[in-house]
């Protein structure tokens, strides 16, 4: 399997520039700005892991299996966390930071929590990904990564349109 990583590298450079510019701004002290910065940093780390795992997956016979599992697990965990961070960022820009109900928090974090638990158990279950003689393979629940992103996109759109005063 061969991956073209040029777009990821370009996006990582762009994200790094955003991080530098946002860090130089003095107005980045409020809670929403901190979430935005965390979102940028997590996305940057995820892009770097994407490039690294493209190499390790392509050359799986040269890379120790434990390292491939560790890197891919970290990458995919961030893939579950990024849509959650975006939703939280949008949420805190729509409502007051201190008006969050605990039921909303539990429900909001549930899809990502399910994904992260699946990643943590993946070494034994092989539900998300695994390696065999032909290399990296998607497990039966790999598509939950896409479903997770769609779930958070729908939640964010519904929540924003419901609470927006525009």
Image (cartoon, grey):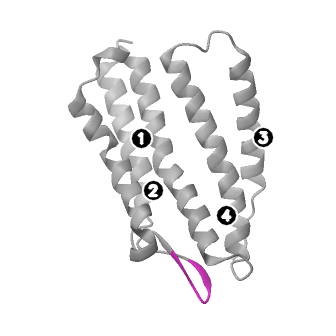
Numbered range of the magenta stretch: 130-136
How many angstroms separate mark 1 from mark 2 (CA)? 11 Å
Contact flag, marks 3 and 1 (Cβ < 8 Å): no
Residue 15 in view in this figure: yes
How many angstroms separate mark 3 from mark 4 (CA)? 17 Å
- Image coords of residue 166 (percent x, y): 39, 12
Graded by Cα atoms within 10 Å as few (under 14), some (14 to 19) or many (20 or more), the crowding at tag 3 reads some
Q: Earlier in the sequence, mark 2 or mark 4?
A: 4
Task: State the residue in front, 15 or 7.
Answer: 15
- Image coords of residue 2 (percent x, y): 73, 73
Task: State the residue in front, 73 or 11.
Answer: 73
- Image coords of residue 6 (percent x, y): 78, 55
Graded by Cα atoms within 10 Å as few (under 14), some (14 to 19) or many (20 or more), the crowding at tag 2 reads few
Residue 154, by quadrant, is top left
How many angstroms separate mark 2 from mark 3 (CA)? 24 Å
Instruction: Say which residue label 3 marks.
Output: 13
Instruction: Say which residue label 1 marks.
Output: 153
Report the side of 9 relative to 49 (left or right).
right
Contact flag, marks 4 and 1 (Cβ < 8 Å): no
Q: Secondary structure beneath disc 2?
A: helix
Is residue 29 magenta-colored? Answer: no
- Which residue appears at 31% of the width and 19% of the height? 163
- Could you say which disc has been placed on residue 146 in the image? 2
Contact flag, marks 2 and 3 (Cβ < 8 Å): no
């Amino acid at each position: 399997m061969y991956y073209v990583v040029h777009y990821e590298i370009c996006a990582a450079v762009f994200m790094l520039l955003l991080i530098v510019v946002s860090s130089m701004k003095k107005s980045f002290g409020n809670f929403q700005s901190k979430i935005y910065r965390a979102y940028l940093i997590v996305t940057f780390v995820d892009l770097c892991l994407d490039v690294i795992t493209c190499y390790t997956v392509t050359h799986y016979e040269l890379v120790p299996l434990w390292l491939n599992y560790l890197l891919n697990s970290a990458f995919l965990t961030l893939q579950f966390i990024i849509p959650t961070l975006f939703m939280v960022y949008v949420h805190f820009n729509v409502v007051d930071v201190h008006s969050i109900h605990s039921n909303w928090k539990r429900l909001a974090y549930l899809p990502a929590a399910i994904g992260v638990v699946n990643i943590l158990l993946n070494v034994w279950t092989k539900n998300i990904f695994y390696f065999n003689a032909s290399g990296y393979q998607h497990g039966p629940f790999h598509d939950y990564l896409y479903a997770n992103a769609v779930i958070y996109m729908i939640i964010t759109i519904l929540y924003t349109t419901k609470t927006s005063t525009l």
